[in-house]
Each structure stands twice: as C-alpha cells, then as structure tokens.
Image (tube, coloured by chain):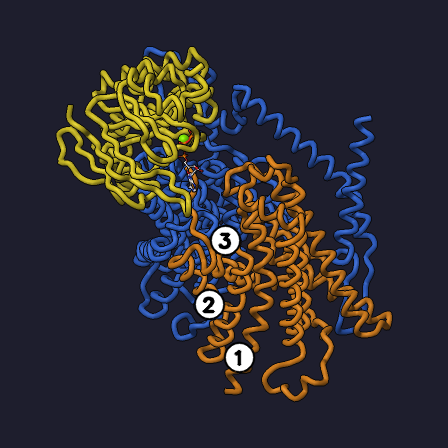
C-alpha cells in the first residue's frame, strides 16, 4: 500500500537531550500504526514535531495526501499542518473547557470553513448556510463518536472518558487523512477502552484514513494495530506486525520486559 | 471549638492589618510645616474592619471551594436569575418593552445633567463591549485600550480643528484609525506571551499619552484642543439643550449597534475561534486556527470600537486633552469587563452601569471610586472570575435525541 | 566629556534603582510566572514609610544617622510585610486559575494600593528628606557625581552580592532555584512551595524598599504615583535582561539606566519615559527572551 507520510532521519534536541534520534517512519494509507515505547521515549515529541509545535533539528517529513499533491511539512505552522490533513489529540487533554461540546467540534471545522467578520455581522446567505452545515457536520461527528448526548454541555464538565472521545471528535472534524492519537485510552476503565477500540476501527473503516496511535495499553494495541513501531530513547528499535513485536527479543528487553517475560 | 479557632484567626488577621496599616493610615506628616498628625481612630477602624472582613473572606473562599467541588462531582452550574430572565421570552419581552419606553422618555423627564451621566454610562457600555472582544472573548489582556480611544478622539479633534470636518465624516475615520493603530501595534506584539502583551500594551498606552502631551505641534500639548464641534443634526448645529438629547439618542443607537454586532460575532466562526484561543492557544492552533491572524482580528476590532468612541467622546465634551487618556481610564474599562463577566454582553452592560452610575449617585462612593475599582478586580478574580453574569454559550436543538441542556428551560 | 561622565554616573544611579526593583519582578516571575504589577506600589509604600518614620523621628530630635538607619529599616520591614500580605490575598487563591486571573488581580492590587496611599495620605508631592549623608571626599567630584549617587551605587552592589550569596549557597536559595525550575518536582522532593513563594515576595519587596528609600532621598520628593512608572521601567529592565534571570535583571537595569540618561541628556528630556517604553516594545519584539534569558519551548 502507498505511504501517506514519510519521516526520514527525524531528530529533535532539547538542549543536551535528544528526544527523537534519527527516526525513520512510514505511515501507509488506511493503516493503524501503533507507536509504543517506555515513558520518555520521545513519542509525544514526535507528534509535536509532525504537527509543527516543535521544529526538528534534522530530518524530513513529507506527506502525500490521497488526491492531492505531495509535499513536505517541515517548518509549517501547526495550523497549516492541520489544514493539510494531519490532526492530533493530546495526551493531557486540551479541550476548550468553557465552550460547549458542540462548539469544541465546530472549532475543528474552522479550517474547512470561510466566514469572516463581515459575514458574521451581516449574516449573508452563504454564511448562514455554512454555519448550518458546520453545526450539522459537527453533530454528526458527535453521534459517530457516541457523545451526542452531551452536545450542549460545557466540555470541562464532561466525564473523563467522554473528554477523551471529544478530543477525537474534534480532531475528526478537521477532515484529516492521518489522525494522530496520543494515548487515547489513558485513564479509561476497561469498558471505556472497549468502546474506544471499536471507535478507532470504525474510524478507519468509515473515514478511510490512516491512524498513528501512541498507546500504553498493550491489549488495545495488539488487538487493533496493523503494524507496531517501538521507540526507546528517541530511536526506533523495532517495527513489525503485532505478532513480530510480541516475539521480538529487543522489544521484550527494552519495554515489554516486566509484563511479558516471566 | 471550631468557633474559637476562627475567632483567633480573625484576631490575628486584625492585629496584622493594624500593624500593616499603621504608618500610612495612622500617621500623617506635613514635612513642610513639620507637623505630625496621629489618627488613632483609623487604627480602630482597620482593626474592627479586618476582623469582620476576615470572616467574610474565609466564608466566601469556602463557598467557592464547595462550588468547585459540586462541579467536579458532575453537578450543574446554577443559572443565575438574571440569566434565566433573559432566556424566558414571556418575561423578557415585556421587560424589554418597559425598558425601551424608559430609554426613550428618559431625556424628556430628567435634567440635562442626568442625561449627560446616562450618555457617559452608555459610552462605557460600548467601550466595555469593545474591550470585551479583546479581553473577554480572545483572552488578550489589553491594558492600553485607552490609547485607541485617544487616537479616535484626536482624529476628530484635529480634523475638526484644522479642516472643519464634521462628526459624521470623521466617525468612520476614527474607527479606521483605531483599527490601523491596533494592527500596527498588534502585528509585532501579538506573537508574545499573554502577560508580555499586557505590559506592552500598557507601555504603548503611556507612549501615546506622552507623545500627545509633548508633541505640541501636532496635539497642542497638555492644553489640548477646545471648541470641537458637536455632532450636527442633518447639517444643523443644535442648541446645547437639544444637543444633549440628540447625543444621548446617538449614543443609544451606537450602543444598540454594538450589542448587535458583538452578539453576532460571539456566535460566529470568528467568535468561536477567539474563545478557543482564550481557552487553549496550543490546542487552538492544532485545530487549524491561525493564532496570529485571529488575535490580530480581535485586537484590531476592539481598537476600532475604541477609535469610534474616541470620536464620540471628543464630540460630546467638545474638549480633549491628554489627561483624559491615562492608564486609569483603561483600568476602569477593564474593571467593567471583569465585574460584568468576561465574554458576557449583559454582564458588561450591567458592569458599566454599576461602576459608572454608582459613584455618580452615591457621593460617598466617588472618593473611593478608584480604590473600589482596584478592589473589584482582585475580589472578582478571587471569588467570581466569571463575573456577575457568566458567559453563556448558545445551545442547539437536535431532533431525535434527548438533549439535557433543553430540559431545564 | 564632563557632561558624558555626568550622564554616565546618572545612568548608573538610575540603573541601580531599576536593578533593585527589577530583581523583585524577576524573582517572582521565575517562581510563579506572574508579572507582579503591584511591585511598583511596594516600592512606593517603602518610600512613604521611610518618609513618615523619618519625619516623626526628626521631630523627636534623633540624629541623622539614626534617622537614616531606622527609616530604612522601617521601609524594608513594611514593604516586606505588604509584599507578603499581597501574595496571600491576591495571588495565592489563584494558584491554579487561568493565567489571566492573577494578572488582573495584580493590576487591581496595584490600583488599590495607589489609591489607598492617596486617600490615607495625600495626592501632593511630599518633600523627602535627604537621608543619605554627604561624604567629604566627594566634594572634589561634585561636578560629575554626588555622594548620594555613590551611596546608591554602593548599596546596590552590596545588596546584589548578598542576594547572590543567599541564592547560591543557602538552603532557601537552593529551594528557590529548584522551585523556579520545576515546581511540581520541587514539591515532590519536599520543598514547601507556599513558604518559598512567600519568601520570594518578602525578599523582592525588601529590595524594592531599599530602592525606594535611596531614590526618594536622591530625588527629594514622592507621591502615591511614583511606583507606577518606575514599576514599568523596572519591569522593562527585567525583561531586557531576560525575565527569571537575576544577573539579567541587574544588567537590564543598568542598560535601561544608561539609555534613559543618555537619551534625555543628548536627545530630549520631554520624552524621558517614552525611551523606556520604546525600548521595552523593541526588546519584546526582537528578543523576547531577553539578553540573558533562555528561550525554552513550552512542554506540550
Ligand atoms: N519542551 C521540552 N523541553 C525539554 N525537554 C522536553 C520537552 N518536551 C519533552 N521533553 C523531554 O523529551 C523526552 C521525551 O518526552 P516525550 O514526552 O516525547 O515522551 P513520551 O514517549 O511521550 O513519554 P510518555 O509515554 O510518558 O508520554 C523526555 O525526556 C522529556 O522530558
Ligand atoms: Mg507522551
């Protein structure tokens, strides 16, 4: 299958600390690629780098969105990266707590809509129509992610699990071709994790997008990923199918040690 | 037992404040005549006052904490009664009708003095709503708001003085100049962190005032510009009496216009982007919103309103000088926004009326006006950061599902 | 040349004062990331306290040195007490609030304190006694500098050295540095954050009081509003040097002092305050991290 994102020799330094170290990674069309590794391995830093929040000190990142021309995303501002079709969720939830759930998702539509100040004041036909479409689209996503019952609640008042889902809903609203999920199951109970598992598979099926997933919950990772990449100290130490990773001695040593050897 | 320790706490607080305020409250020196006045009565006042207030303070802190716990436990905010009134049409429409009638007959039943005060209060409503876009919606702490007000006022003052241009011609020009200055200042500084923005805007406000004070060739220095024309009525100059009434109605129109615009903006694509920016800058960018552009639009739009009101101010008072545009003016407008409720239109209106009319009508307050404003900023932040009326967001109805927000209407 | 030296010394004096006050901003910012707008008012209150105490003592016929020492001491004690109290009232309840909240609270506190002094004392300028003694040996250099200027510079230098030692070598200093670097981490290893924050406010306020007494007796008059402008300028100095950095605050203070001194001396004195503000705007635009500051990226 075709690769939609190619990362080559990506390196991120924080002063003396090398958080990501010459990392190569390919994300293929419509796959679920899990990124695992011990705490501090540099997974979130990789996301921050892809989404333009940090600048890499070395390396290249290029994308080839389906149906659009390929290009690099090095040095693009976060909002441009999002507009190009890569969206993320945050490990430590970053919703807009004093906006309603629906509005949170509507923010995701921002980069796909056009109304400006004049439009907002005069409310011409085009603006009204666009606004209507935004509301409907956003509500539809809420239904899809299973949190439509909270539509008018403030995001900050939602239960924890629902906040994680809202992060995903908000990201989906930007119509990405790659969705980056940073530990979506963190803090969820087994039942919520089950729901999340279904949701992620469903997103891949229905939206036809690639998903890059950081996750510590091994059961979730093993059950839904097509491929797994393992990071340790900023480097990629292994890559393969869940089966291969499960049996890879390097991985077991670096990461799965405590849980799987015994 | 509990009570005893509470009293002890308050006693300690009281003692501490008596110590703290001793030199400044009790002793007054007159170094010229070498006199010292001892005002022991003040010490008693401070002692008793802080004793009582410390109870209130702790009680309110506890209340706030309890409130937070309720929210975390999944409970709902209690919607304040004013808000409920504005949402209930059966109550709201008659109320609005009564209010409109009052507004219309007001200048004919009250003296010119009262009408002037009301006009001033309305000006602050508009200024507050303008600043509300910047601070309340976009979360940019602009402490130099008065600079744009000054820009507007001097635009009219100068154009009127040199070229005899009238109010109506300059009103859009003033708004434009406000926006222009907003963009000029905003462009470089809006990339900065929020707290730096506060201090840069503060500095900018002072620069504008100092330039107006010192650049005599341009601004006529501290003596300012006098005899600025009042707004004309279809080309006619009105008598002072009718001009007051005319200006009052102009102001009403401007205020309604502002409410209309801000209300529409608040629930638009741009307005949502502003609020998202206030809530979380990084998440906002990650959702595809251009941070700089969005900030700039809020900042410039706020400045536009200040510029417009500056023109109005110059036309109303017919005299301007740099002394009208000090930091305190920015502080007053900020207090209005903070007291009323950041992001809330009704809140800002109420805030403006309370803060402008109260000191006007209660003379006892007027001496303590600025003291009160300062205290309001602190107290509101500590106990009720959302203001008198917290910002309500629009709710949407959808068929087929049971939307909890709809039930309790 | 003589004029140049005179301006240089003038700048050094101003710079010393800015540095003393800037330290308070920088230390507080380093620890709780708050621009303490009320810091300028602390300085003003220090000056007022010194004036009041000095006047009372003068009436009771104390000698000059005793007045100087006692008035300064009172200023330091009271400013510290105000700093401590302000933190408890206006900032501590807002430790976990959104960033805008403590900032607004700080502005409120600043306005409140100004008007508190205005109402309790007077809005007029009060003549401030020349507390700093005249040194005989300075007579020779009268044309370029004065005893007061020398005294201000020396005091500042001594205070800086003491402060540096406190921060470098004492346990409290270490805890302060730890807190500034990573508050959560410091808490985990057993640093009492509330205490460290209080101490920071107390030290910063004491420095501001020293600055207040020195500059007031140099200039010779004070009113309730002096803290506002000086506060912004000292903040400028702190930003110039790199906010959070202690040597930066000192460096920034001197640079700002000289800039103002030379600009008013050679260009125009009408725009004295404009230079400082313009400098502030320029630094923030071109080097927001300041001269000695680190431009760290925010963790996401
Ligand atoms: N802005 C920053 N400045 C300095 N160091 C940073 C920054 N962001 C991350 N780091 C460091 O980079 C390393 C990698 O961090 P990162 O957050 O990417 O790890 P992670 O793999 O996501 O871990 P976890 O599973 O705990 O989320 C860590 O040592 C972290 O402290
Ligand atoms: Mg992480």
Of C231 and B87, nearer the camera is: C231
Q: Residue at x 69, y 36 (%)?
A: B57
Do badges 1 and 2 share one subunit?
A: yes
- Foreground mark, 3 or 1? 1
Parent chain of label 3 = B
Mark seen at residue C7? 1
Whether residue A228 is visible to the viewer of this picture, yes or no, is yes
Q: CA distance from mark 2 to mark 3?
A: 18 Å
> In the displayed structure, would residue A116 be above or below residue A107?
below
Q: Which comes sooner in the sequence, label 1 or label 2?
A: 1
Mark seen at residue B330? 3
Q: CA distance from mark 1 to mark 2?
A: 18 Å
In the image, taking residue B72 as reference, residue A65 lies left or right, namely: left
Mark seen at residue C274? 2
Name the quadrant where ligand 1 sits: top left
Parent chain of label 2 = C
Q: Colour of chain A?
A: yellow
Chain letter, blue in picture? B
Of B107 and C210, nearer the camera is: C210
Q: Secondary structure at mark 3?
A: helix
Q: Colour of chain C?
A: orange
Where in the figure is residue C42, as x and y percent of width and height? Answer: 65, 57
Where in the figure is residue A239, as x and y percent of width and height? Answer: 28, 25
Task: Say which quarter of the image contains residue B287.
Answer: top left
Do badges 3 and 1 share one subunit?
A: no
Q: Residues within 10 Å of mark 2 (few under 14, many from 20)?
A: many
- Foreground mark, 2 or 3? 2
């Amino acid at each position: 299958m075709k690769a939609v994102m190619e990362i080559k020799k990506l390196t991120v330094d924080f002063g003396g600390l090398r958080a990501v170290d010459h990392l190569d990674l390919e994300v293929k069309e419509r796959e679920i690629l899990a990124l695992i590794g011990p705490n501090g391995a540099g997974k979130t830093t990789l996301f921050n780098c892809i989404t333009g929040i940090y600048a890499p000190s070395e390396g290249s990142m290029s994308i080839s969105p389906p149906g659009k021309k390929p290009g690099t995303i090095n040095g693009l501002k976060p909002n441009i990266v999002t507009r190009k079709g890569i969206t993320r969720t945050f490990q430590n939830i970053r919703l807009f707590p004093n906006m309603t759930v629906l509005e949170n998702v509507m923010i995701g539509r921002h980069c796909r809509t056009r109304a400006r100040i004049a439009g907002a004041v005069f409310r011409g036909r085009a603006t009204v129509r666009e606004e209507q479409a935004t509301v409907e689209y956003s509500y539809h996503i809420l239904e899809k992610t299973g949190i439509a019952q909270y539509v008018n609640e403030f995001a900050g008042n939602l239960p924890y699990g629902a906040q994680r889902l809202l992060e995903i809903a908000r990201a989906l609203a930007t119509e990405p071709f790659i969705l980056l999920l940073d530990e979506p199951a963190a803090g969820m109970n087994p039942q919520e994790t089950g729901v999340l598992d279904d949701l992620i598979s469903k997103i891949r099926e229905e939206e036809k997008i690639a998903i890059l997933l950081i996750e510590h919950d091994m059961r979730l990772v093993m059950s839904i990923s097509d491929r797994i990449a393992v990071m340790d100290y900023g480097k990629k130490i292994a890559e393969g199918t869940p089966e291969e990773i499960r049996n890879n001695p390097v991985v077991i040593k670096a990461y799965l040690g405590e849980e799987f050897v015994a | 037992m509990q009570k005893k320790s509470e009293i002890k706490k308050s006693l300690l607080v009281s003692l501490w404040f008596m110590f703290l305020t001793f030199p400044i409250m009790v002793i007054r020196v007159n170094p010229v005549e070498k006199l010292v006045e001892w005002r022991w009565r003040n010490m008693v006042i401070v002692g008793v006052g802080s004793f009582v207030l410390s109870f209130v303070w702790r009680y309110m802190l506890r209340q706030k904490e309890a409130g937070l716990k309720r929210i975390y436990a999944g409970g709902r905010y209690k919607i304040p009664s004013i808000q409920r009134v504005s949402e209930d049409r059966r109550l709201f429409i008659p109320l609005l009708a009564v209010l409109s009638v009052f507004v219309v007959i007001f200048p004919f039943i009250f003296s010119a003095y009262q009408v002037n005060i009301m006009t001033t209060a309305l000006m602050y409503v508009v200024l507050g709503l303008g600043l509300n876009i910047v601070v309340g919606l976009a979360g940019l702490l602009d402490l130099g708001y008065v600079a744009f007000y000054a820009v507007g006022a001097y635009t009219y003052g100068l154009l009127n003085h040199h070229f005899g241009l009238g109010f109506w011609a300059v009103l859009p020009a003033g708004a434009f100049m406000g926006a222009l200055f907003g963009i000029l200042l905003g462009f470089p500084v809006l990339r900065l962190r929020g707290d730096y923005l506060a201090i840069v805007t503060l500095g900018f406000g002072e620069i504008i005032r100092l330039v107006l004070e010192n650049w005599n060739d341009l601004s006529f220095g501290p003596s300012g510009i006098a005899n600025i024309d009042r707004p004309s009525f279809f080309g006619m100059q009105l008598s002072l009496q009718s001009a007051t009434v005319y200006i009052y109605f102009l102001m009403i129109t401007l205020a309604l216009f502002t409410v209309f615009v801000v209300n529409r903006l608040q629930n638009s694509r741009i307005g949502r982007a502003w609020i998202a920016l206030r809530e979380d800058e990084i998440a906002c960018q990650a959702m595809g919103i251009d941070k700089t552009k969005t900030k700039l639009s809020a900042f410039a739009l706020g400045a536009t309103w200040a510029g417009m009101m500056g023109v109005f101010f110059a036309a109303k008072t017919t005299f301007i000088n740099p002394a009208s545009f000090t930091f305190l003016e920015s502080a007053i407008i900020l207090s209005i926004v903070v007291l009323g409720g950041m992001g809330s239109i009704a809140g800002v209106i109420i805030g403006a009326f309370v803060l402008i009319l109260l000191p006007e009508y209660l003379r006892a307050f007027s001496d303590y006006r600025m003291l009160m404003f300062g205290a309001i900023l602190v107290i509101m932040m500590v106990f009720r950061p959302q203001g008198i009326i917290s910002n309500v967001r629009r709710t949407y109805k959808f068929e087929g599902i049971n939307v909890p927000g709809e039930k309790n209407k | 040349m003589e004029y140049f030296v005179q301006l240089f010394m003038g700048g050094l004096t101003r710079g010393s004062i800015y540095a003393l006050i800037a330290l308070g901003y920088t230390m507080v910012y380093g620890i709780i990331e708050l621009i303490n707008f009320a810091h300028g008012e602390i300085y003003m209150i220090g000056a007022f306290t010194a004036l009041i105490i000095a006047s009372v003592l003068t009436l009771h016929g104390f000698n000059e040195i005793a007045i100087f020492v006692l008035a300064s001491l009172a200023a330091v004690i009271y400013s510290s007490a105000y700093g401590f109290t302000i933190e408890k009232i206006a900032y501590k309840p807002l430790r976990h609030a959104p960033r805008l909240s403590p900032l607004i609270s700080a502005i409120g506190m600043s306005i409140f304190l100004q008007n508190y002094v205005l109402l309790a004392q007077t809005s007029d300028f009060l003549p401030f006694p020349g507390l700093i003694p005249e040194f005989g040996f300075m007579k020779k250099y009268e044309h370029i500098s004065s005893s007061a200027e020398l005294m201000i510079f020396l005091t500042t230098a001594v205070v800086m050295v003491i402060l540096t030692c406190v921060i470098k070598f004492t346990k409290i200093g270490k805890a302060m540095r730890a807190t500034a670097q990573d508050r959560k981490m410091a808490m985990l290893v057993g640093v009492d954050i509330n205490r460290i924050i209080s101490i920071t406010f107390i030290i910063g306020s004491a420095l501001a009081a020293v600055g207040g007494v020195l500059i007031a007796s140099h200039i010779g008059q004070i009113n309730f509003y002096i803290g506002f402008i000086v506060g912004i300028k000292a903040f400028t100095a702190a930003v110039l040097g790199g906010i959070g950095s202690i040597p930066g605050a000192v460096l920034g203070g001197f640079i700002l002092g000289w800039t103002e001194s030379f600009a008013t001396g050679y260009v125009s004195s009408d725009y004295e305050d404009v230079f400082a503000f313009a400098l502030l705007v320029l630094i923030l635009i071109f080097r927001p991290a300041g001269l000695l500051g680190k431009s760290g990226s925010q963790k996401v």
